[in-house]
Amino acid sequence: MDLPDDDRPRERLAAAGPGALNNAELLAVLLRVGVAGENAVRLAERLLREVGGLPGLHRASLADLCRIKGVGAAKAAQLLAALELGRRIAVSAPDARPVIKAPADAANLLMYELAAREQEYLMVLLLDTRNRVIGRPIEVYHGSLNTSLIRVGEVFRHAVKANAAAIIVAHNHPSGDPAPSPEDVAVTRAIVEAGKLLDIDVLDHLVIGQHRFVSLKERGLGF
């Protein structure tokens, strides 16, 4: 006997694993049932169209999801909970204090969160003398990155309080293209110079895009 359309993604997941399902089918497993005349897969496909695909779903709020016909508060909460679990898995590490050995290590801690932002956010990782991360990434600023707007002292405020030996700065490009702008380089130069005065090493400035990042230190920009 054929399974109802709402059950087929769950059966395929059980048989072949989640990697065998497309994005809409994975969402359908969370949504479980659709609305009258529309099964869960069709609802999931419509949801993805309305929010702008997975990047849009990543950015969506509870209110955004509740506005979509057939989703409702309960389904919206399930989706946001699944996204948050994904975020926590993405930034987790066996060591409670991950060690930064390369730019990619820092990017992996920040990319999941920053890549979804619709504005530019500047964040700072604090590091001890062994390049172990101290605490969570700190949001310093959001808006267009501009040397006239960013207070460089604010970048170091938490580092001074935590007696951090070094920092890594990162910000996102909402366009998805991580190519550094002249303003990014100017901001980097100002931060690096301030770090020298405070005896706090600025190890890198990362620009985060969609699934990509650029290390300004590796490119010799602002350092």
Image: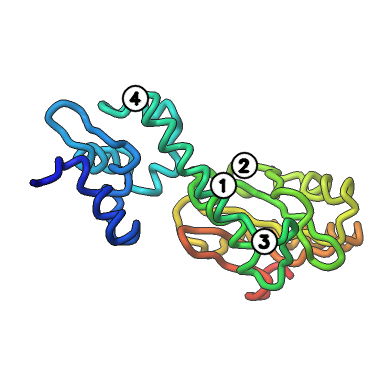
Disc nearer the start of the sequence (3/4): 4
- Mark 1 or mark 2: which comes first in sequence? 1
Q: Position of residue 26 (x, y in %)?
A: 32, 49
Residue 190 visible (yes or no): no
Mark 3 to mark 2 CA distance (whole Å): 30 Å
Circles 1 and 3 in contact, beta carbons < 8 Å? no
Q: Residues within 10 Å of mark 4 (few under 14, many from 20)?
A: some
| Kind of residue sitting beneath label 4 | Gly
Q: Specify which label sits upstream in the sequence, 1 or 4.
A: 4
| For residue 33, side relative to residue 146 (left or right) | left
**Colouring method of the image:** rainbow
Q: Look at discs 3 and 2 and give the one toward the viewer.
A: 3
Position above or below: 58 against 164: above
| CA–CA distance in space, label 1 to label 2 | 5 Å
Q: What residue would you read off at disc 4?
A: 72
Residue at left 62%, top 49%? Answer: 145
Residue that appears at 87% across and 63% down:
196
Figure quadrant of the C terminus: bottom right
Dots 3 and 2: beta carbons under 8 Å? no
User: Which of labels 1 and 3 is toward the front?
Assistant: 3
Q: Position of residue 116 (x, y in %)?
A: 48, 48
Residue under numbered circle 2: 142
Query: What amino acid is found at the position of numbered circle 2 in the picture?
Result: His
Q: Residue at x 39, y 42 (%)?
A: 57
Q: Label 2 crowding class (10 Å Cα cut-off): few <14, some 14-19, many 20+?
A: some
Q: Are marks 1 and 4 in contact (CB under 8 Å)?
A: no
- What is the three-letter code of the residue carrying label 1? Glu
Query: Along the polypeptide, which appears first: circle 1 or circle 3?
Result: 3
Report the residue marked by disc 3: 94
